[in-house]
Amino acid sequence: MPRRQTPLEVMFSLFKTSFTLSHRALAELLLSDLPLTNGQPTAQMSQDTSWLSRTIVHSQPGSLEDRYFADWSCASNQILHKLQEKGYSNADIYTMIAAATDTMAQALSACGRNGLLYRNAASRLVSSQPDKVPSRFFRKLI
């Protein structure tokens, strides 16, 4: 039986395949600049692809402390800005995220989380008119 993807694997894969944003580039936006007890920030540690893959991308939900990550509202704004900088429209972003909704919901369910909540939130946001929805709503999906 093949190993199931974790939610972070699904997210990193989505950004790599759909938005051509490498794991390192996404990690730099998601991870904290504040040093851990070893003196290094997780954003800096993400330059080591083995560490990034093993510790972050393949981690189970709830296994990482919040201090590993940047403030979510700032990180989501940076991700959205980076995607728009690459030329993706709001509609493009919605379409790509919608395409991964089932995969993310399955990954969440496989990890004991309620994938239906994610599916419902994504469905509600995607069903609205993407170009008329303020950017702040994208942050809920990203």
Image: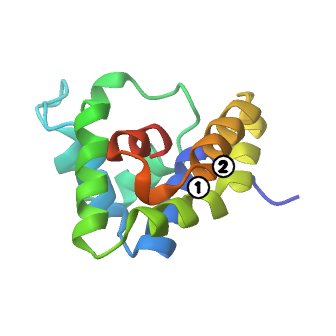
Residue type marked 1: Val
> Residue at left 42%, top 40%?
137
Report x, y in % for residue 124. 64, 41
Residue type marked 2: Met
Query: SS for tag 1?
Result: helix
What label sits on residue 104 in the rendered view? 2
Category of crowding for the residue at label 1, using alpha-carbon neighbours closer than 10 angstroms: few (below 14), some (14–19), many (at least 20): many
Q: Which residue is mark 1?
A: 10
> Residue at left 22%, top 69%?
85
Q: Is residue 33 left or right of 91 when viewed as pictured?
A: left
Q: Quadrant of the N terminus?
A: bottom right
> Residue at left 28%, top 33%?
73
- Asked if disc 2 and disc 1 are in contact, CB closer than 8 Å, the reply is yes
Question: What's the coloring here?
Answer: rainbow
Report x, y in % for residue 116. 76, 34
Image height check: is 131 above or below 137?
Answer: below
Q: Residue 96 falls in which quadrant of the image? A: bottom right
